[in-house]
Image (cartoon, rainbow, N blue to C red):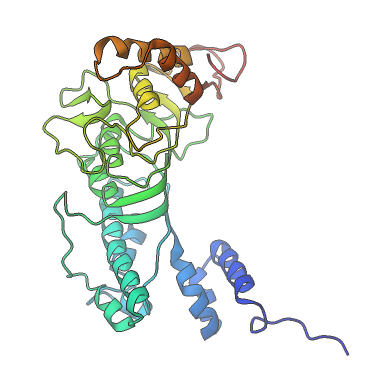
Amino acid sequence: MDAAAPSFSTLPTELLLQILGFSLSCHPTPSSILCLNYPIYVLSFPLLYEHVRFHSTRGMSEFAQLGGEGSDSSVGQARLRAPVRIRTITVEKVNEYGVFDALKSVFERTVQWQNAFDAWESNCRLDDAMERLDLGSGFERGREKIQQVELEELSLCLHSHTRNPRLEAVYEALALVNPTKFTWTGPDPDHHFSTAIVPQATFHLFQAVRHWSHLTHLKLTNIAFPNFSFPDIVFAHPSILTQRNAATSPVAPEGYPLPRKLKAIYIGQATFVPAELIARFACSEEEGAEGVQEIRLVDVYVQSIWERRMRRGDVEIAAVELLQYEEMVRKCEEEVVKRVRAVVRCEAKTERIMGGDRVERVGVLE
């Protein structure tokens, strides 16, 4: 007698979770999978919200209302039966000025979901957990009182805009999260050199990075760094973009430019990048912190794309010059150069047809 074919009810839960995870990631309407039956709903519901992907500010706004008291029934509490833990958030090709304001509302909502999930895990009482999802519950908005959303990864693939009157929303939104990995890239193909992160957005981005105590990997491409001539922005020690009279971050104290857990930095297709900034990133160490272990600079230019690419030698020279001007840096020249060579890697990847800094071969730039 032939054995009966396995069904969903006979599959091990671990295998079924893998199947559902794959199905939810590629299904055009993932929520349809939840309608199969109740056991599938129970397993799929948390998976559906573990990895959230947005393609419009409208989707972000609907997400921010999900489960709230008095929200529309199509996107509100009727669709949220239990709190969930969001692990990754991805925003792709949202070319709208209000994207970071919308993202801020998503993070504020996710904080409440995080609190509800923690309450559910601790006392297993669903009613108590769902009460924490009330939109009116006291969310502290003061800079020092903001509760951050802990994410495994936050990925942005979008443009910022120089003429956006609300670029400070970049900081306001990103200060609400604490990702382990962060990526911000441009939506254009690699061979199209464009600036997705404009200088003003870069300033607000690095202000937010100072709050990310869990950050281990940072990837930024299609980025332009602020020029020294900007009147309201200075590159002050410890070489983090610092606005005059800005409050000191409790996460990244004065004297340490990067989150202590940061291990790897990737910067690609970047312009106006100061070699001194990279030297400080490479040589920054503090008691209890191992420091950055890898800095990859791919098609990084010291000025515009028509000028020369940054070489590792530029970073070495900048690091040695820091010894002459900063008493707190007590390493000898040989140690500093050795540190830069161990950490920094400059590369040429995309070559233009004519003009600019042309290299004989695509590869490492010493």
Instruction: Please state the horizontal and vertical placement of residue 2, each as a whole percent of the image.
Output: 86, 86
Q: Is residue 235 above or below residue 10?
A: above
Residue 277 placement: quadrant: top left
Left or right, 87 with respect to 138, comes to right
Q: In the depicted view, which residue is nearer to us: 1 or 334?
A: 334
Q: Residue at x 36, y 80 (%)?
A: 124
Question: Residue at point 54% right, 29% down?
Answer: 191
Q: How many marks?
A: 0
Decide if residue 240 is on the left or right side of residue 32. Answer: left
Q: Residue 321 in the image: state x and y as whole percent.
A: 33, 10
Quadrant of the rendered image containing residue 201: top left
Front-lying residue, 20 or 189: 20
User: Residue at position x 54%, y 83% from top?
Assistant: 39
Residue 17 % position (x, y): 58, 71
Q: Is residue 179 placed above or below 199 in the rendered structure?
A: below
* Of 237 and 172, the residue lying toward us: 237
Instruction: Tell me: residue 219, above or below residue 366.
Output: below
Which quarter of the rendering shows the N terminus?
bottom right
Can residue 298 be seen at all in this image of the molecule? Answer: no
* Quarter holding residue 316: top left
Query: Which residue is at the far bottom?
Result: 1
**Farthest residue in the left direction?**
245
* Residue 249 visible from this viewpoint: yes
**Residue 240 vs residue 90: left or right?**
left
Q: Residue furthest right?
A: 1
Q: Position of residue 185 (x, y in %)?
A: 44, 39
* Placement of 78 over or under 192, stated as above or below: below
